[in-house]
Image: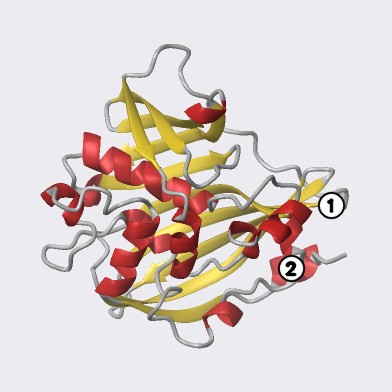
Amino acid sequence: MPIDVAAALSAAPTVREASWTERDVMLYHLGVGAGARPLDPADLAWTYEKQLKVLPTFAMVAGQGISAGPHTAAAMAMPGVDVDLRAVLHAGQSLTVHRPLPTRGTATITSRVADVWDKSKAAVVVLEQHAVDGSGQPLWTSSMQIWSRGEGGFGGRSGPSDGAPAPDRDPDVVLTAPTAPGQALVYRLSGDMNPLHADPAFAAAAGFERPILHGLATYGIVCRAVVDDLLDGDPARVREYSVRFAGSLHPGETVETWVWRDGDMLTLRAICPERAGQPLLTHATMEVR
């Protein structure tokens, strides 16, 4: 079996050094849709080194982009896990931001397989990461759930149930973020070079009509929309952000985010209006400062 559960869970954590510069940050922001309004100071703050801000979701690609060293891909490998990329989907993502991310910096990132859930026809690999700066101060903690078709049925735990769904009422706010036809081609330059997001033949073999946008790109697009429209453009106000990926988006389509407010907690749901409200992100929450 490509996933050796015992080996994955017992393996020592992997540790890598990550570094990034303003160029990596700006490229990431372009990959999540910034730059569409280059004369707007609020939008320019994501894409121009003068007074540059950093979205907290940049943590998902820090150290993997244009400034990455030659061994980044190897360092991201998961012990005991060797699966076909065509059978892999990003199932969920959570992020806790311990302090604002700098526009350039270094971090030590420790990764481990925290769990493997048995979903009968698939396995979900839970990859945890902890990042600290040069002085050992925590920067972020993340948990990624990776869905691997055909790898279930090994008799393991099915994992926790999904979190609470969105409230049964109209959202308090609806945010709209269009994407560009070449959005995935830009986003992949931040580190995720899976051909599913660029190669039409590869996408067709995986069962998709055409290449799809990265789930983490949608994750960042929603975060940017919330920061811009609800948090006064201040990315430091995001404390935690967790989602389940529920569907794919084709580059060029729109991300529509419904937001329900409850004090410092936002409940989110992202859909694609061009495809009759196809869900993109569900069971999504953001805790803000």
**Residue depicted at 46% across the width and 52% down the height:** 217
Can residue 229 be seen here? The reply is yes
From this view, report whether residue 204 is shown above or below residue 269: below
Residue 103's tag is none
Q: Residue 59 vs residue 52: left or right? A: right
Please state which of the two labelled residues, at mark 1 or mark 2, is closer to the viewer. 1
Q: Residue 199 vs residue 81: left or right? A: left
Amino acid carrying label 2: it is Val
Quick one: label 1 or label 2, which is nearer the N terminus?
Answer: 2
**Residue depicted at 43% across the width and 36% down the height:** 255
Residue 81's tag is 2
All told, the count of numbered labels is: 2
Residue at the disc numbered 1: 150
Can residue 116 be seen here? The reply is no
- Quadrant where the image shows the N terminus: bottom right
Amino acid carrying label 1: it is Gly
In the foreground, 198 or 53: 198
Place residue 259 in its image quadrant. top left
Q: How is the image coloured?
A: secondary structure
